[in-house]
């Protein structure tokens, strides 16, 4: 697959739960990689993805193929990830409730990460940070994929759970495979430069 940022925006936050169940089911099929294009096309038609998202069929297929691909990788790394000792959750800074000075997070460039100050109860980053810390994860809220290498080289993590756009997840996954760290990935439901969204229940299920 080509590692290029999407030229389109998507918002799956209003897509029915059956979409994600189907993606997970297809990902569990034997040899799904060999028939991904065909299965993605069938899924797109069955779940009316074009109508639900406003995407054209080509964009919908790119998105579906990438989501299935991520699920396949999650399944194959799941056991190793669950057995991993020290884990970190990497969150995208664009999911903060505010992207300006209303966000009270301090950026610590030595990590590098925003440190959430929990200034807003209804901020996804605040929820996810609290959830992960309760489960013993370190948490980094990062401005981009380029921070990942530094975070991993400064710490001995055995497992990485990442939330990001699918293309960033693909790049991150390749890097984790190279350095032999078990990874799990949660794709954003809504991409863009601000107000991005992910599903907290899905995040919790991956932890
Ligand atoms: S809760 Fe945290 S991440 Fe969200 S806006 Fe406040 S300081 Fe920023």
Image (tube, rainbow, N blue to C red):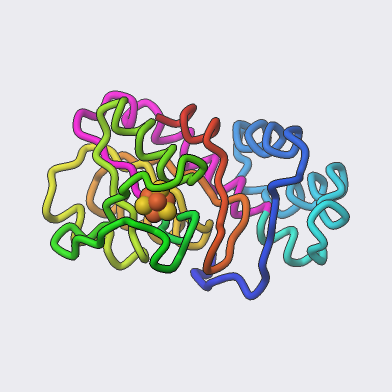
Task: Give the percent coordinates (x, y) of residue 164.
Answer: 47, 55
Q: Is residue 75 above or below residue 152?
A: above
**Residue located at (75% from left, 45% from top):** 14
Q: Is residue 69 above or below residue 58?
A: above
Residue 34 seen in render: yes
**Residue located at (24% from left, 39% from top):** 138
Q: Is residue 130 above or below residue 194?
A: above
Taking the image as shown, residue 102 lies to the left or right of residue 166, namely left
Please provide the residue range marked out in magenta. Answer: 64-91
The residue lying toward the viewer, choosing from 120 and 84, is 120
Task: Give the percent coordinates (x, y) of residue 163.
Answer: 45, 49
Majority secondary structure of the magenta segment? helix
* Quarter of the rendering containing residue 156: top left
The residue lying toward the viewer, choosing from 129 and 82, is 129
* Quarter of the rendering containing residue 108: bottom left
Please tell me whether residue 75 belongs to the stretch shown in magenta.
yes
């Amino acid at each position: 697959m080509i590692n290029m940022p999407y030229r389109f925006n998507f918002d799956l936050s209003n897509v029915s739960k059956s979409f994600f169940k189907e993606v997970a089911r297809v990902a569990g099929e034997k040899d799904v990689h060999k028939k991904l294009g065909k299965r993605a096309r069938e899924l797109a038609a069955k779940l009316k993805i074009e109508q639900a998202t406003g995407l054209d069929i080509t964009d919908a297929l790119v998105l579906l193929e990438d989501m299935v691909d991520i699920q396949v990788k999650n399944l194959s790394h799941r056991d190793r990830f669950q057995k991993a000792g020290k884990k970190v959750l990497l969150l995208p800074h664009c999911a903060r409730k505010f992207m300006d000075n209303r966000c009270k997070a301090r950026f610590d460039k030595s990590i590098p990460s925003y440190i959430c100050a929990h200034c807003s109860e209804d901020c996804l980053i605040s929820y996810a940070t609290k959830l992960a810390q309760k489960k013993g994860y370190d948490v980094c809220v990062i401005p981009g994929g380029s921070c990942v290498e530094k975070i991993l080289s400064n710490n001995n993590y055995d497992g990485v759970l990442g939330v990001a756009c699918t293309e960033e997840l693909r790049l991150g996954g390749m890097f984790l495979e190279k350095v032999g760290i078990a990874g799990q990935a949660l794709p954003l439901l809504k991409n863009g430069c601000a107000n991005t969204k992910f599903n907290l229940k899905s995040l919790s299920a991956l932890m």
